[in-house]
Image (spheres, rainbow, N blue to C red):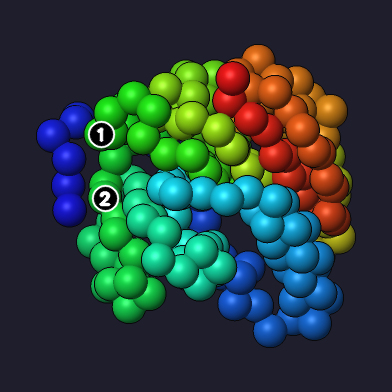
């Protein structure tokens, strides 16, 4: 489903499927990531959920299972190949720009921004828009720098770009990401499963 909002070009990153990796080291890192994510969302009790940057729906499927029966909506940039996957997992999804969401004010009480803000040209504008449509909980994650790039270099990936993953135009340490979130919401928890930062915050 498309929206009436004009969507501008926003870097979307590479197509490497870290969620479906068979590499044992990467799989262990992903388990650590999801352990933290699961623990943070377990402390919420949503009645309406929004995920921005839902991609192929790996996190979406997890949330739909965890919060069975709770209305869920996801958005991502236009890519018709994604809609089949969304249908498979029973997710309602739309194509939209994170800085211009097609929802009324105060619609969702749990918003997920998982591995998306590093791709956004104006993260403050994106977070302001999430605050507009949100009423309570925000859970957001980004790659933790400079560890992320160092780990890419260690596996000889993106060497010409000094380990920077294609499409990553924003870079934060754990502390600087917390400061970004704190400009828009009250940070409750900051966790750092290698090599990510995950923050749970509350909109005032």
**Toward which corner of the image does residue 164 lie, by quadrant?**
top right
x, y percent for residue 130: 46, 29
Mark number displayed over residue 94: 2
Judged from the image, the secondary structure of the residue bearing numbered disc 2 is: strand
Classify mark 1: helix, strand or loop. Answer: loop
Q: Quadrant of residue 28?
A: bottom right
Closest to the observer, 80 or 98: 98
**Residue that label 1 marks:** 102
Residue 203 in the image, given as x and y percentages of width and height: 58, 25
Mark 2 vs mark 1, CA separation in Å:
9 Å
Residue 31 lies left or right of residue 87; in this view the side is: right
Res 187 visible: yes
Q: Position of residue 108 (x, y in %)?
A: 42, 39
Quadrant into which the C terminus falls: top right
Measuring 38% from the left and 56% from the top, which residue is drawn there? 72
Task: State left or right for residue 183 relative to residue 25.
Answer: left
Residue 152 horizontal side relative to residue 185, left or right: right
CB atoms at circles 2 and 1 under 8 Å apart?
Answer: yes
> Image point 75% across, 21% down: which residue?
179
Q: Quadrant of residue 39?
A: bottom right
Local crowd at mark 1 within 10 Å, few (<14), some, or many (≥20)?
some
* Residue 162 in view (yes/no): no
Task: Work out whether 67 lies above or below 145.
Answer: below
In the rendering, which numbered label is found on residue 128?
A: none
Q: Residue at x 34, y 24 (%)?
A: 105
Give the image location of residue 61, x and y in percent: 48, 69
Q: Residue at x 17, y 47 (%)?
A: 2
Q: Is residue 109 above or below residue 163?
A: above
- Relative vertical location of residue 63 with respect to residue 163 in this rendering, above or below: below
């Amino acid at each position: 489903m498309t929206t009436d909002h004009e969507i501008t070009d926003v870097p979307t990153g590479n197509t490497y499927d870290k969620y479906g990796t068979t590499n044992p080291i990467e799989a262990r890192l992903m388990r650590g990531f999801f352990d933290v994510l699961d623990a943070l969302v377990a402390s919420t009790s949503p009645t309406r959920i929004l995920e921005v940057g839902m991609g192929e729906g790996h996190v979406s499927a997890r949330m739909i299972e965890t919060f069975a029966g709770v209305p869920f909506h996801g958005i991502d940039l236009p890519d018709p190949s994604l809609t089949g996957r969304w249908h498979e997992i029973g997710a309602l999804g739309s194509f939209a720009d994170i800085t211009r969401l097609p929802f009324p004010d105060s619609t969702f009480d749990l918003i997920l921004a998982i591995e998306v803000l590093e791709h956004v040209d104006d993260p403050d504008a994106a977070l302001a828009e999430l605050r507009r449509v949100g009423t309570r909980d925000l859970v957001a994650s980004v790659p933790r720098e400079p560890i992320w790039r160092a780990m890419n270099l260690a596996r000889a990936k993106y060497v010409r770009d000094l380990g920077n993953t294609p499409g990553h135009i924003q870079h934060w340490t754990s502390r600087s990401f917390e400061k970004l979130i704190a400009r828009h919401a009250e940070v409750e928890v900051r966790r750092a499963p290698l090599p990510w930062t995950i923050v749970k915050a509350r909109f005032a």
